[in-house]
Image (spheres, grey):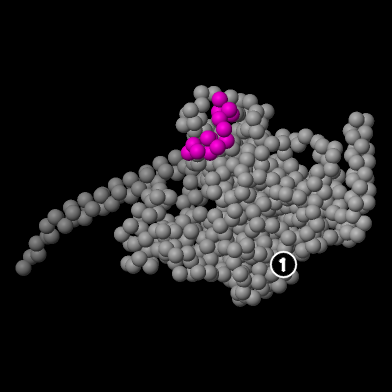
């Protein structure tokens, strides 16, 4: 205990010395403050009224023997660390969104960034923590789109971070489970997310933030992660509010073999064979770039640690960590999955069949109609509903039923589709992000665009401050409840009733039945037998009635006496 106290005193002395050195060397300008974190003193860079900290390590580099292990603590430092450049991105091919710079990639990638506004003495600011999307295969917390300067100017601290992706973040193997203290493997990327949130919880007060007012927000697979983290036993007390943009995990995961621990480990063993490794040690010795070139499909799995039960079951039982949610999706989510496709009534089932099983298409997909235009619209609707819209509606409904405050939205601000995309104008997957962050690095905005962005920045930061977007400039926005409604965030915002199309109704029945079967297999078998017996009984009854009718028709009628 004395050693820890001596270390704190020494670090405090170093911080004081750093202040003195900076002050002497810069008499005219106010230097960025030196902040004492749990690992050592850091200093950011001044950007206008904000102090920005780029490349703050929140976990040890997951390299060598730490590859495919839970994130470990950072080695402490004593010299002042100047955080004036972003850390490398995690290993990946390409980038999400695809128009953002790829940048340097490395396994040594567990860094976070902070945008901190000026504040009054003693004031504790709410915190927004961003979790990026990209199919858990791509993405970065430091691309220009996700810079938090505009949001931070509304009186919140913005934090972005990297987490491991692809095979580095989601490989499961029996050997990895055996060496783990929790006897689990996979979901290392989610463990990185938990580690970043733990870092925020322990350190954000030193930057002027309020650890009791943390809001996570994310898009696509980042939003999917949030839906799972919101019911994870590892995140209790780490965030109060959550914003999900176009992504949730509410399908019955336990029915997909590759999303179970056993199935994921079988898939991991197949990857190990493809990589040509005879042992776990040999796999760890293969270069990161070589592993990146071996085919692997990452997935969030039921590992028994981060996700100890299917999230839908936890939501139904009310085992939910945050107290409030803001949840939504974009009007035309599905169009990005049809880029380059020429959809017609004739090839409709084949186009959808590349992504979905034939039984799901037959059961839930809308009719393709008679023209290429109607076929494309139906395919886009099905893609959007099955990937995003159903999940967001289910998330809102279950969280609301569990007593959580939920505000639901739909973003509708159509822009011209790319050439060959199959559409003219649409609001596709990811279209809301520039408006949420308050800038578009690639497009010049009209006044209408800027006004819409100002509104969304106001709503997202107001939610981070209070757990409700009320008062952000939109029309009255009641919580999702008995008469479910959503806010249409558009050039003319308005509240609209939540109405399910036929595809979403069919999906809901399908997933409900699948969940019941998996949760109560004996009951499901018994009910099936009862249905079969009732059906057989009905058939027998009809046959008896038919035989009787035939007998009656063949019986001669009595002759009458003339």
Q: Residue 236: x and y, percent?
A: 73, 45
Horizontal relation, residue 493 to residue 523: left or right: right
Eyeballing the image, is 307 above or below 333? above
Residue 269 visible in rendering: no
Q: Residue 503: x and y, percent?
A: 45, 59
Q: Residue at x 38, y 55 (%)?
A: 351
Quadrant occupied by the N terminus: top right
In the picture of the structure, the residue carrying the numbered disc 1 is: 458
Residue 235 on the magenta segment: no
Residue 290 on the magenta segment: yes
Which residue occupies the foreground of this view, 215 or 420? 420
Q: Residue at x 35, y 55 (%)?
A: 349
The quadrant where residue 285 appears: top right
Main SS, magenta residues: helix
The quadrant where residue 399 appears: bottom right
Q: Residue at x 47, y 64 (%)?
A: 418
Eyeballing the image, is 69 above or below 29? above
Which residue occupies the foreground of this view, 354 or 290? 290
How crowded pointer 1 is (Cα within 10 Å; few <14, some 14-19, many 20+) is rated as: many
Residue bounds of the magenta highlight: 282-295
Which residue occupies the foreground of this view, 248 or 355? 355
Q: Residue 127: x and y, percent?
A: 76, 55
Q: Residue 237: x and y, percent?
A: 76, 46
């Amino acid at each position: 205990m004395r050693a820890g106290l001596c270390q704190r005193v020494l670090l405090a002395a170093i911080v004081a010395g750093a202040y003195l050195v900076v002050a002497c060397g810069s008499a005219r300008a106010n230097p960025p403050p030196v902040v004492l974190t749990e690992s050592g003193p850091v200093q950011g860079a001044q950007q206008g009224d904000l102090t920005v900290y780029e490349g703050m390590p929140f976990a040890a580099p997951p390299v060598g023997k730490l590859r495919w292990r839970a994130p470990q603590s950072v080695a402490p430092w004593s010299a002042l660390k100047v955080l004036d450049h972003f850390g490398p991105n995690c290993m990946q091919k390409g980038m999400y969104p695809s128009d953002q710079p790829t940048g340097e990639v490395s396994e040594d990638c567990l860094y976070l960034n902070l945008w901190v506004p000026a504040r009054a003495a003693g004031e504790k600011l709410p915190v927004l923590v961003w979790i990026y999307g990209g199919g858990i295969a791509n993405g970065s917390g430091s691309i220009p789109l996700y810079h938090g300067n505009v949001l931070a100017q509304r009186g919140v601290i913005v934090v972005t971070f990297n987490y491991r992706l692809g095979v580095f973040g989601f490989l499961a193997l029996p050997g990895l489970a055996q060496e783990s203290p929790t006897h689990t493997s996979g979901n290392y990327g989610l463990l990185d997310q938990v580690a970043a949130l733990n870092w925020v919880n322990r350190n954000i007060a030193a930057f002027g933030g309020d650890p009791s007012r943390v809001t996570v927000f994310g898009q696509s697979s980042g939003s999917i992660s949030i839906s799972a983290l919101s019911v994870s036993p590892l995140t209790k007390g780490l965030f109060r509010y959550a914003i999900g943009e176009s992504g949730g995990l509410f399908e019955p995961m336990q029915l997909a073999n590759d999303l179970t621990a056993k199935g994921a480990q079988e898939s991991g063993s197949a990857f190990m064979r493809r990589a040509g490794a005879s042992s776990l040690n040999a796999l760890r010795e293969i270069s990161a770039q070589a592993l990146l070139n071996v085919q692997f499909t990452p997935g969030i799995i039921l590992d028994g640690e981060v996700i100890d039960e299917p999230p839908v079951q936890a939501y139904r039982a009310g085992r939910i960590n945050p107290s409030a949610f803001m949840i939504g999706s974009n009007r035309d989510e599905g169009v990005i999955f049809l880029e380059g496709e020429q959809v017609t009534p004739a090839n409709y089932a084949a186009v959808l069949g590349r992504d979905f099983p034939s039984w799901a298409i037959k059961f839930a997909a809308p009719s393709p109609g008679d023209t290429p235009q109607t076929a494309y619209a139906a395919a886009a609707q099905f893609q959007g509903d099955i990937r995003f819209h159903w999940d967001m509606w289910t998330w809102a409904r279950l969280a609301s039923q569990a007593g959580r405050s939920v505000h639901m939205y739909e973003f509708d601000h159509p822009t011209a589709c790319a050439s060959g995309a199959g559409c003219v104008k649409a609001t596709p997957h990811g279209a809301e992000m520039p408006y949420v962050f308050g800038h578009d690095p690639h497009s010049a905005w009209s006044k209408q665009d800027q006004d819409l962005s100002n509104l969304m920045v106001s709503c997202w930061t107001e939610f981070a401050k209070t757990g409700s977007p009320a008062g952000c400039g939109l029309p009255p926005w009641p919580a999702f409840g008995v008469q479910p409604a959503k806010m249409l965030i558009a050039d003319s915002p308005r509240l609209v009733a939540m109405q399910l199309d036929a595809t979403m109704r069919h999906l809901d029945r399908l997933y409900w039945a699948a969940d019941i079967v998996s949760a109560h297999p004996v009951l499901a078998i018994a009910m099936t037998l009862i249905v079969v017996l009732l059906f057989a009984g009905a058939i027998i009854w009809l046959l008896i009635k038919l035989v009787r009718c035939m007998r009656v028709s063949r019986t001669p009628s009595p002759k009458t006496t003339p």
